[in-house]
Amino acid sequence: MALSTFFKWAGGGVVAVIALLCLLLQGAYWYGASLLPKELPQPRREYPALARETLWRTLGGGDAPISARRLNAFSYASLIFESLVPVYLTRGGESLAMPADLELVERASSATRGAIDDARRARIPSPPPTPGGSNAEALQQISSDLVFESSALFIRTSREWPAERMADIVLDHGGYGRGSENLEQAARAYFGADVGELTRDELLSLMTLRYRVVPMDPYCQPEQFRERYTERIKYVSASGLPSATALSLPRLKPIDCTRPQ
């Protein structure tokens, strides 16, 4: 009888712990979501299907249709756990490649995060410094809020936007060099054409520039550019994409390479 009572209490304790964990996860999401604007920033335009497909391929999507899974607080926590277990138990801390759809969600939420921050900076002046240790406390609170907010934004992005819209906001943000801040501007700066007129090779070159670590204009630093292109294609194991030697960019506009890019 005592043993039966023990198992009942143990089972009830397990259920209570699980319920508490679920409540904490959902509460963390609700808190992070409360910090976000009601309407998320939108991309300024719809990009051509070929541009979206090219981005998808550079993320490792291959020939599969562009897509992204819908997440909630629980599936998001499961993804975090799944990513940590192989890193720390089987791979000795080696980082793992993120699936293409989650990479798309990550980049879309990051671009949205930047747009939200820009809007906030435009509305709210910087507060004056305060004496004592309150600055450190405020920074700690901001840092904590940012974690909750970013997690909630990742989940909201996956739930509220189709994959095509995610691709649009990724393409609509990010530095491509030559003073361009989105793919539309980059198409004009590099090829003197509308983004809808670009070839696959031209789009691939701009996607490579989006991931650049150092300036590597394909006109001024062609060797560095092609080396980086080769790295990107190898990284995503992309099939059906041209090699660096086969990449053809006859419309690439020359620029003054002595000026900083």
Image: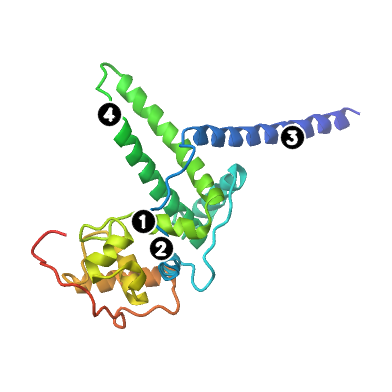
Q: Tell me the distance, in whole angstroms, between the alpha carbons under discs 3 and 1.
A: 46 Å
Tag 1 residue: 172
Q: 121 left or right of 30?
A: left
Q: Disc 4 on helix, strand or loop?
A: loop
Q: Tell me the distance, in whole angstroms, between the alpha carbons under discs 3 and 2.
A: 48 Å
Q: Tell me the distance, in whole angstroms, between the alpha carbons under discs 3 and 4.
A: 48 Å
Amino acid found under the numbered disc labelled 3: Val
Of the pair 152 and 163, the residue shown nearer to us:
163
Q: Disc 3 on helix, strand or loop?
A: helix
Q: Disc 3 vs disc 2: Cβ atoms closer than 8 Å?
A: no
Amino acid found under the numbered disc labelled 2: Tyr
Q: Earlier in the sequence, mark 1 or mark 4?
A: 4
Tag 4 residue: 125
Rendered-image quadrant of the C terminus: bottom left
Relative to 228, is 136 above or below?
above
Amino acid found under the numbered disc labelled 4: Pro
Tag 3 residue: 15
Of the pair 99 and 71, the residue shown nearer to us:
71
Q: Disc 3 vs disc 1: Cβ atoms closer than 8 Å?
A: no
Of the pair 55 and 81, the residue shown nearer to us:
55
Tag 2 residue: 47
Q: Disc 2 vs disc 1: Cβ atoms closer than 8 Å?
A: yes
Q: Tell me the distance, in whole angstroms, between the alpha carbons under discs 2 and 1.
A: 9 Å
The quarter holding residue 214 reads: bottom left
Q: Disc 1 on helix, strand or loop?
A: loop
- The crowding category of the residue bearing disc 2, from other C-alpha atoms within 10 Å (few below 14, some 14 to 19, many at least 20), is many
Q: Disc 2 vs disc 4: Cβ atoms closer than 8 Å?
A: no
Q: Report whether residue 69 is seen.
A: yes
Q: How is the image coloured?
A: rainbow
Amino acid found under the numbered disc labelled 1: Asp
